[in-house]
Amino acid sequence: MARKTVLVTGASRGIGKAVAVKFAKKNYNVVINCIHSEDRLLQAKKEIESYQVSCLAFMGDMGDMSQCEKLFKQIKKQFGTLDVLVNNAGISYIGLLQDMKSEDWERIIRTNLTSVFNLSRLAIPCMVSQKYGKIINISSVWGNVGAACEVAYSATKGGINAFTKALAKELAPSNIQVNAVACGAIDTEMNQFLEEDELIGLVEEIPAGRLGRAEEVADLVYHLGYKNSYLTGQVIGLDGGWI
């Protein structure tokens, strides 16, 4: 049986890297991407290849359609098609909306939401032609309930949730499933801005009594990407009972 191929964006660290490594362990060809950290991306590539699978590393802004098209040309040349797309690339913005600059708004929309449109649009023809595919979007609990001082971030994740539900309906007849994982507080660099007392207070709010691990997100993403063709259009919370 031919080895399947997965694309994971924002894969130089954190959740994205954990997802990419998980699929590598399960014998997938892996395509990884980031926009800035070339050294980390190449380190991730080396780790992925240690599992005896092929890895394509691509530096580029997935909010830029021309960059996405360049990436897909490389994917088709090296692997022929794409079976699983994991839209993980994302940035945060902490601060009052009234203090947010227009360029900061545009940057977070481009990175978190436009990238999901760009890559999904390019992946769909591959998946439709083979009558199989999985699109998994990494969302957030703030996309469900919103967070003060994270209005723009919440808006992008809420957009991803709606995008997921709508696209799932569109693609279900083609045997393509689209789901999202709404992450709670995960122990990654995105949360390292918190002071120790803030972190303690956050953990106290979570019924599970701890932050989630990137590997736990990766386990769920792999499950969504591997099988279960009847599960689609869902935004699945992974937050230790927090929200």
Image (cartoon, rainbow, N blue to C red):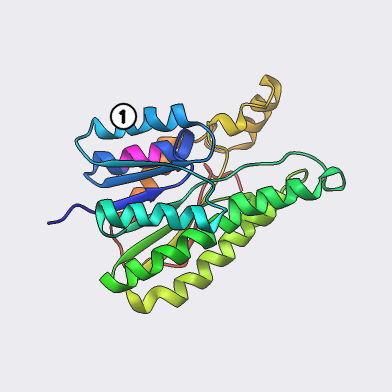
The residue that disc 1 covers is 46
**Residue at the limit of the structure toward the bottom, as seen here:** 173
Magenta residues, start to end: 18-22
Q: Nearer the viewer, residue 181 or 95?
A: 95
**Residue neighbourhood size for the residue with mark 1, other residues' Cα within 10 Å, grouped as few (<14), some (14–19), many (≥20):** few
Indicate left or right for 95 with 15 as reference. Answer: right
Indicate left or right for 180 with 231 as reference. Answer: right
* Image location of residue 240, percent across then percent down: 52, 41
For mark 1, give the secondary structure.
helix
* Image location of residue 122, percent across then percent down: 43, 64
Which corner quadrant of the image does residue 125 belong to? bottom left
152 inside magenta stretch:
no
**Residue at the limit of the structure toward the left, as seen here:** 1
Q: Is residue 155 above or below residue 230?
A: above
Identified at 39% across, 30% down, the residue is: 42
Q: Main secondary structure of the magenta part?
A: helix
Identified at 37% across, 50% down, the residue is: 7
* Image location of residue 56, percent across then percent down: 33, 42
Q: Is residue 134 visible?
A: yes
Q: Is residue 191 above or below residue 66?
A: above
Indicate left or right for 34 with 230 as reference. Answer: right
Q: Nearer the viewer, residue 192 or 132?
A: 132
Q: Nearer the viewer, residue 210 or 96?
A: 96
Q: Quadrant of the N terminus?
A: bottom left
Residue type at mark 1: give it: Lys
